[in-house]
Image: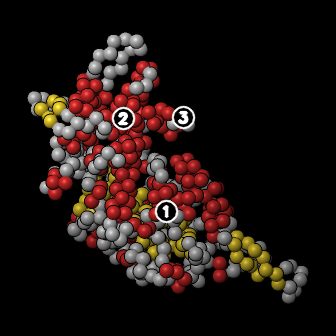
Amino acid sequence: MSSIGLHGFRHENAPYDVRRWATEDEMAVFSSGDPTGDLILAEGAGIDFAGSQDFANRRNRNVMFLASSGAGKTYGGVEPNLINHQPGSYVVTDTKGELYRATAEGFERDGYEVTRLDTIDLGRSACFNPFAFVRSEDDIPVVVKMVLDAISTHREKTSDTFWPKSVEMCAGSLLGVLYNLEVINGCLSRCARALGIVEPRYMTMRNLRRLLALVRVPSDGGPIDLSPLDHMVEQLSVGEMDDPFCPGRKLVFEPMGDSFGVRQYHAFKSGAERTVKSIIISLQADLARVCTPEIERVLDHDEMHLDEIDERRRVIYLVMNDNDAANNFLGNLAFKQLIHEAMKKADANPGGKLKRPVQLIADEFCNLGRLDSFERAISVMRSRDMGVIMCVQSLGQLDHVYGPQVRDIIMENCDAIVIMGTGSSLGTARFTSELCGTTSIASQRAGEEGTVVSVEAPVITPTEVSRLPREQCIVKISGAKPFLTRKYDVARHPNASRFLKLGA
């Protein structure tokens, strides 16, 4: 039996059956036996990070901490796992930069490469160009959708798919033109990559906005005057043009009339005048979020190298604001692109895995906003040697971002759920009670001496969940009984004195 009791909770006729809670010995089968080799869940509860147990006791590295505000999810859940310094890489969403201040120096001393995308203090942030991951025409529509999903404030609110897809076509045509310029200049050739020349010269957010400003739409029935961008697209089709971003430089190349950018541009411009103008205005409104000087500077080139997450031991901090979400789209976009790039890279490897394990840690997961198709990604992470720890304040918070159906899929793919506190959330308390299941209680009925009956009752009721002492939590690992224990105290972690600045 666990060394901790459920203080003060008792049925009127009989005590709870002690077999309802998992024992420490029963929990030990999931652990490596050393907290520094585990994903730490709570005191006496962990999942072997390397997954070296037999199949029956092996679990994925997807964990959800359900913890109301102030319940200790950072202190008892996030920080212990960060300072374990597993032999792989970490990607951490960091509210207010607290985790960076507490753990970055320890990672650097231990030989990790530390990168910070700071959406609060952009002047201290590494640069991040989302277009750096366009390596072929097939990548253009994927990256365009990711970018627009992140920066647009209205795409999720409409059920009409015509306008979002039309804006994607417009943006895709412009990025396609920039991609063609990269190809013409040899920036995407194998030789350039072999020499380490992989930084896009043309594909930047600033240049995308410049091309958009060149789009002209003739009035219905009016004279057709070619805009500078029309001339550029025409020259791409011919195979000879002036470099639009390097005056006086002549470019000669194989005609690109059948390229993605040229075809998309003609398709976009073929619409009715009012429709095309509306599409342009919609894209201009979306790109308005990225036109401030500081954000343009951050997006102008790439220092994040998300596609190299498994090449060496790395830690990427995505510092986000929990009060003002104006720039949080940068964290959303980086998180999505990293998952996409890591999955693609793993699939290209002979064994279908990354070279090093990658652990995503999303403190205040919902502050990231909606991650498109995350429910599909989390279901296949394990086979690529990836995992994600998510900290959520309540089921209602997760519902608000993803909706009940997607929420269920996300949670069903977590082999461990840790309830650290439900606050006033009745829905989370009811969920916890149902998650813990029922138990048989032997009860003697009043007035019937010697008569014992077996009664099915919840392991813990919603009311009891809401009254859990602050230092306690419930750990539910798939296929095991619930475990009642204490929250992990990061100050007692074996690595705390070496890798953690307490109170930073």
- Which residue lies most toward the top here? 222
384 relative position to 431: left or right: left
Type of residue at label 3?
Answer: Asp
Under circle 1, the secondary element is helix
Of the two numbered discs 3 and 1 on the same chain, state the one appearing first in sequence: 3
Question: Disc 1 marks which amino acid?
Answer: Ser
Q: Is 133 positioned to the left or the right of 165 in the image?
A: left
Instruction: Check whether the beta carbons of the residues at disc 3 and disc 2 lie within 8 A of each other.
Output: no
Do tag 3 and tag 1 residues touch (Cβ < 8 Å)? no
Inter-mark Cα distance, 3 to 2: 21 Å
Crowding at dot 3, Cα within 10 Å, few <14 / some 14-19 / many 20+, comes out as few
Label 2: few (<14), some (14–19) or many (≥20) C-alpha neighbours in 10 Å: many
What residue sits 43% from the left and 72% below the top?
40
Q: Which residue sits at x=26%, y=64%?
A: 311
Q: Position of residue 359 (x, y in %)?
A: 38, 65
Pick the residue in front: 365 or 234: 234
Q: Which residue is mark 1?
A: 379
Q: SS class of the residue under badge 2?
A: helix
In terms of sequence position, does the residue under pointer 1 or pointer 2 come before the other?
A: 2
335 up-or-down from 328: above or below: below
Residue 264: assigned label: 2
Q: Percent position (x, y) of residue 170?
A: 37, 33
